[in-house]
Amino acid sequence: MRAVTWHGRADVRVDTVPDPVIQEPTDVIIEVTSSGICGSDLHLIEVMAPFMSVGDVMGHEPMGVVREVGSEVTELKVGDRVVVPFNISCGTCWMCNQGLQSQCETTQNRDQGFGASLFGYTKLYGQVPGGQAEYLRVPFGNTLPIKVPDGPADDRFVYLSDVLPTAWQAVQYAGIPNGGSVLVLGLGPIGDMAARIAQQLGAGQVFAADVVPERLARARARGVTVIDTTEQSDVVGRVRDATDGRGPDAVIDAVGMEAHGSPLATLAQKATAVVPDAIMEKVMQVVGVDRLAALDTAIEAVRRGGTISLSGVYGGATDPMPLMRMFDKQIQLRMGQANVWRWVPDILPLLTDADPLGVDDFATHHVPLAEAPEAYMNFREKKEGTVKVLLQP
Ligand SMILES: NC(=O)c1ccc[n+]([C@@H]2O[C@H](COP(=O)([O-])OP(=O)(O)OC[C@H]3O[C@@H](n4cnc5c(N)ncnc54)[C@H](O)[C@@H]3O)[C@@H](O)[C@H]2O)c1
Ligand SMILES: [Zn+2]
Ligand SMILES: [Zn+2]
């Protein structure tokens, strides 16, 4: 089959790889019909490169049609339409029963000291072949795939794999009081959707900061108060002015930071053969400073006693945090990979023809698998108005 494969920093290709086969009696094989490119995929071709291998199949946001089922699969049959969560979770262990699917005890990567395996991700998360491919092997066929009805286009359901539950969890963890205020940092797919969900769930004031014009325009069109800068003092000043000088009740960081001063970053720099070290170090310093700035802005902006919710992925093991400032402000901080299944029952009722979250036209680009390399680069560089790409194998 054809699949998007990892070849190095800023280098993905479309290769022919072996078709997946049933390995366990509870496996299913799906034919992928749509597969998102995520901000997390960009980490794999940047900072997380040392934890990838040439030929790894990318992608963790797929949906499709069941083509084959293992002998013990009772809950799905050939022809069923399913969305596949990005966490590979068993659905039956202690963690899954707590709604902590990202910590599934059946797929936890204990040898690496990391949580549940993820599709199309690093060695730290099991190095499981991903869903930017024509076919995908999905384990736990009775409990993992989300069955969805035939009829509406894939766009209606595909974001159940990641964007919707991640943004939903970001808003839940933000604990915005009814009618309260929230500032979203970053208007990529995750921040954009988090702002929509915050509105849907009754936030009174929704602010969002980014610098990419198309992204700001999308949020503005839906009634978000946009702040067209990421400069900390400006962002903090503008939200304070609009919140009686206090700052918002909650801040959602949908940017992430992973390059700054961390063991991972150092490894990444060493592993970089393609880019001269001096240049790469410079790039990583800039990236690092940028990404740290988002968290710093969150800490400064949030009102005293407020909550910060991190959905941006953090890779740095030793990044300094201003603990004294956080303690003094009595900030609450929640974070983590989204527990996809935890939120699916809450989200499904909103995926209707009325489309309150605007999923039907959320994607800016639908492209065939063959054009994945160009789409990745456009997404990375925020060119061609790229906000969300759906690959259609
Ligand atoms: N927790 C999870 O389960 C989960 C799931 C999916 C994605 N993520 C993470 O969420 C983050 C966002 O993902 P995405 O797909 O929206 O990616 P993205 O890269 O498209 O979006 C990030 C946005 O942040 C903006 N930005 C950069 N620095 C900023 C700053 N200092 N202040 C405000 N905005 C700033 C960028 O311009 C960009 O628009 C990534 O780190 C991704 O890995 C986490
Ligand atoms: Zn994703
Ligand atoms: Zn489990």
Image (cartoon, rainbow, N blue to C red):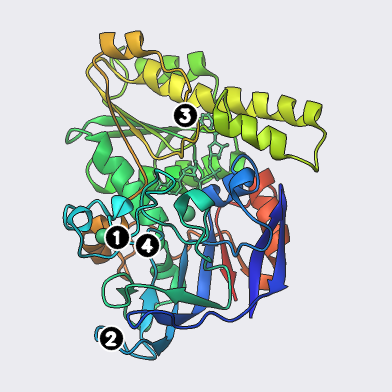
Circles 1 and 4: CB atoms closer than 8 Å = no
From mark 1 to mark 4, how far is it between C-alphas?
9 Å
Q: For ligand 3, give the image quadrant.
A: bottom left
Circles 4 and 3: CB atoms closer than 8 Å = no
Which residue does the numbered mark 1 point to in the structure image? 106
Which residue does the numbered mark 3 point to in the structure image? 317
Residue 373 location in percent, x, y?
A: 71, 60
Which residue does the numbered mark 2 point to in the structure image? 72
Q: Considering depth in this image, is 313 or 53 the residue closer to the camera?
A: 53
Looking at the picture, which amino acid does disc 1 mark?
A: Thr
Q: Earlier in the sequence, mark 3 or mark 2?
A: 2
- Residue 176 appears in the rendering: yes
From mark 3 to mark 2, how far is it between C-alphas?
41 Å
Q: Earlier in the sequence, mark 4 or mark 2?
A: 2
Which residue does the numbered mark 4 point to in the structure image? 88
Residue under the image location 21 percent in, 53 percent down:
95
Q: Earlier in the sequence, mark 4 or mark 3?
A: 4
**The C terminus, quarter of image:** bottom right
Q: Judge whether 195 appears above or below 149 on screen.
A: above
Q: Considering depth in this image, is 144 or 287 the residue closer to the camera?
A: 144
Looking at the picture, which amino acid does disc 3 mark?
A: Ala
**The N terminus, quarter of image:** bottom right
Closer to the observer: label 4 or label 2?
2
Left or right of 291: which side holds 248? Answer: left
Q: Earlier in the sequence, mark 1 or mark 2?
A: 2
From mark 1 to mark 2, how far is it between C-alphas?
18 Å
Q: Residues within 10 Å of mark 3 (few under 14, many from 20)?
A: few
Left or right of 116: which side holds 155? Answer: right
- Residue 382 appears in the rendering: no
Residue 44 location in percent, x, y?
A: 60, 48
Q: Residues within 10 Å of mark 4 (few under 14, many from 20)?
A: many
Say which quarter of the image contains residue 114: top left
